[in-house]
Amino acid sequence: LAKTTQPISMDSYEGQEVNITCSHNNIATNDYITWYQQFPSQGPRFIIQGYKTKVTNEVASLFIPADRKSSTLSLPRVSLSDTAVYYCLVGDRVSGTYKYIFGTGTRLKVLA
Amino acid sequence: GAVVSQHPSRVICKSGTSVKIECRSLDFQATTMFWYRQFPKQSLMLMATSNEGSKATYEQGVEKDKFLINHASLTLSTLTVTSAHPEDSSFYICSARPGQGGSNQPQHFGDGTRLSIL
């Protein structure tokens, strides 16, 4: 199964770019990589998804190397409101059913 | 788009009570929904996969008779915690994937249900 590994925590200052890397050595050929943001007592919120190379949307960029064994979420110019836990998720279809394993997540703290 | 509504947001009840949690995809159809549990300061743990029109698939260690899942339509899945006990207290979160097919459709999550059993 595609288990993910992320740094447990990171600190940053307002206005800085933050890069969070996720390792997923056992990613399957058909799996996409999805990143979520979670605030306390809320469900995870979708940030971005990609399969390979680079994906960018209005809030983040996702960089995926050719071997797809890792991915990096890039948050440009973070603000205090970006303080949250960030999860990368790689789906794995086993015998026709989906197995999703959330890693520990990265607790990002943005400082003023 | 891709809004998932979960209800109720918080439940406090006595031990032995059964509690039903609803998960609705508001603006899309979802043949597959997922139920997770999250303990404080921990990650989400997948409990079961809910498939429209068929039986749910439970993860190892999750009692299917304890956590009843019904996915009666393409927009609604319910989780019933039967005869709840204090150790069932947790944050329960559902998610739904639009459409069918491969893993290129991301899950979209509800805002969770905080269950507290006294």
Image (cartoon, coloured by chain):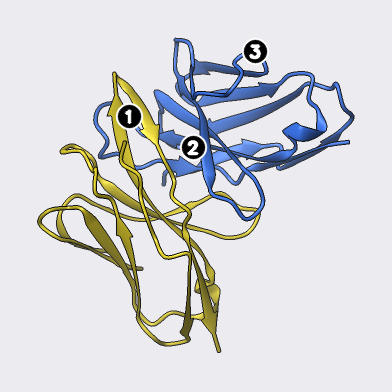
Chain colours: A yellow, B blue
Secondary structure of residue under mark 1: loop
Mark 1 and mark 2: Cα distance apart in space: 13 Å
Residue sitting farthest toward the left:
A66
- Amino acid at circle 1: Gly
Q: Residue at x 36, y 34 (%)?
A: B98
Q: Residues within 10 Å of mark 2 (few under 14, many from 20)?
A: many
Q: Position of residue A112 (x, y in %)?
A: 55, 89
N-terminal-most mark, 2 or 3: 3
Q: Is residue A31 above or below residue B50?
A: below
| Nearer to us: label 1 or label 3 | 3
Q: Residue at x 62, y 24 (%)?
A: B79
Q: Residue at x 30, y 24 (%)?
A: A94
| Nearer to us: label 1 or label 2 | 2
N-terminal-most mark, 1 or 3: 3
According to the image, label 2 marks what residue? B95
Q: Are marks 1 and 3 in contact (CB under 8 Å)?
A: no
Q: Residues within 10 Å of mark 3 (few under 14, many from 20)?
A: few
Q: Are marks 2 and 3 in contact (CB under 8 Å)?
A: no
Q: Position of residue A87 (x, y in %)?
A: 43, 55
Q: Is residue A83 above or below residue A15?
A: above
Q: Are marks 1 and 3 on the same chain?
A: yes
Q: Position of residue B43 (x, y in %)?
A: 54, 49
- Amino acid at circle 3: Asp
Mark 2 and mark 3: Cα distance apart in space: 21 Å
Chain containing mark 3: B
According to the image, label 1 marks what residue? B99
| Nearer to us: label 2 or label 3 | 3
Q: Are marks 2 and 3 on the same chain?
A: yes
State left or right for residue B49 relative to residue B104.
right
- Amino acid at circle 2: Ser
According to the image, label 3 marks what residue? B65
